[in-house]
Image (cartoon, rainbow, N blue to C red):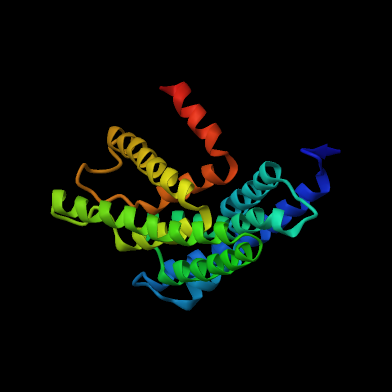
């Protein structure tokens, strides 16, 4: 049985890889959260690490299968680079959603790891096409600049932290993975998603109007959309809604 010219066994294999990666990233999330809470009993951490993280495992497996379907698998290595980098980016995005929601931080170790891997991919792209590598590097600065300006303007207007510096660094790293066009789209989509979710939370009274809402999860959700949908499809969907 084939889907999008790929045998179903490929999808099963990617799903299994996703389940394994999901368990690993679930343990990482617990470790980070455990380290930053007051209760640091090793026994509690070991108990959490030994349990399967079903939700994260299923989410990772599902996203891997969707990525495979959307991007396909080619015999040429260069044609699979986008798929491979998104497979690495996926568990990091899930970690940002979990950790930033609970702790209101994006760990530096996670950002630095993503940065190092992103630079490696940029170098590989540069071997085949220098323009692509330059685009990705410039996008890193563009993403940082956009969110830094927004952070500073928000602080001036509200006289408080409207966005953390971790979000700024995270945007810069995502720029290296997505390129200039996509990081600009990600910026717009992140704020659109944030506005929609913020309004919903206010309506159901889950958040106060002046309460800080983690922005990393919105950037992660926008990233997932950009990974599986071409920009033309996104623009077409938006125009239809409008």
Q: Quadrant of the N terminus?
A: top right
Q: Position of residue 24 (x, y in %)?
A: 60, 65
Q: Nearer the viewer, residue 10 or 242?
A: 242
Residue 128 sits in which quadrant?
Answer: bottom right
Task: Residue at the far right: name it.
Answer: 1
- Residue for point 23% across, 48% down: 211
Q: Does residue 95 appear anywhere in the picture?
A: no
Q: Is residue 113 above or below residue 183?
A: below
Total numbered labels placed on residues in the image: 0
Corner quadrant of residue 4: top right
Report the front residue among 51 and 135. 135
Furthest-bottom residue in view?
A: 42
Query: Considering only vertical position in the picture, is 83 above or below 166?
Result: above
Q: Nearer the viewer, residue 37 or 230?
A: 230
Question: Residue 242: x percent and y percent?
Answer: 40, 22
Can the viewer see residue 13?
A: yes
Q: Locate residue 91, reporting x and y percent.
A: 56, 58
Residue at x 39%, y 44% (from the top left corner): 190
In the image, is 198 to the left or to the right of 63?
left
Residue at left 41%, top 67%? Answer: 107
């Amino acid at each position: 049985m084939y889907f999008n010219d790929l045998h179903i066994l490929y999808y099963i294999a990617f799903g299994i890889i996703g389940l394994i990666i999901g368990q690993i990233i679930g343990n990482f999330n617990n470790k980070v959260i455990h380290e930053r809470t007051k209760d640091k009993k090793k026994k509690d951490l070991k108990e959490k690490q030994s349990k399967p993280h079903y939700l994260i495992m299923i989410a990772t497996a599902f996203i891997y299968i969707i990525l495979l379907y959307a991007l396909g698998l080619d015999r040429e290595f260069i044609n699979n680079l986008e798929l491979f980098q998104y497979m690495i980016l996926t568990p990091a995005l899930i970690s940002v959603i979990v950790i930033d929601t609970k702790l209101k931080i994006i760990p530096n170790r996670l950002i630095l790891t993503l940065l190092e891997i992103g630079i490696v991919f940029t170098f590989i792209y540069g071997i085949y096409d220098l323009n692509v590598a330059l685009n990705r590097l410039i996008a890193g600065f563009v993403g940082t600049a956009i969110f830094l300006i927004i952070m500073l303007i928000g602080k001036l207007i509200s006289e408080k932290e409207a966005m953390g510096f971790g979000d700024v660094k995270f945007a810069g790293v995502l720029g290296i993975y997505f390129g200039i066009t996509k990081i600009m789209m990600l910026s717009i989509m992140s704020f659109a998603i944030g506005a929609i979710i913020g309004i919903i939370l206010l309506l159901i009274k889950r958040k106060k109007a002046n309460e800080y809402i983690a922005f990393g999860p919105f950037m992660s959700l926008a990233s997932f959309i950009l990974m599986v949908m071409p920009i033309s499809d996104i623009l077409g969907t938006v125009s239809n809604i409008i």
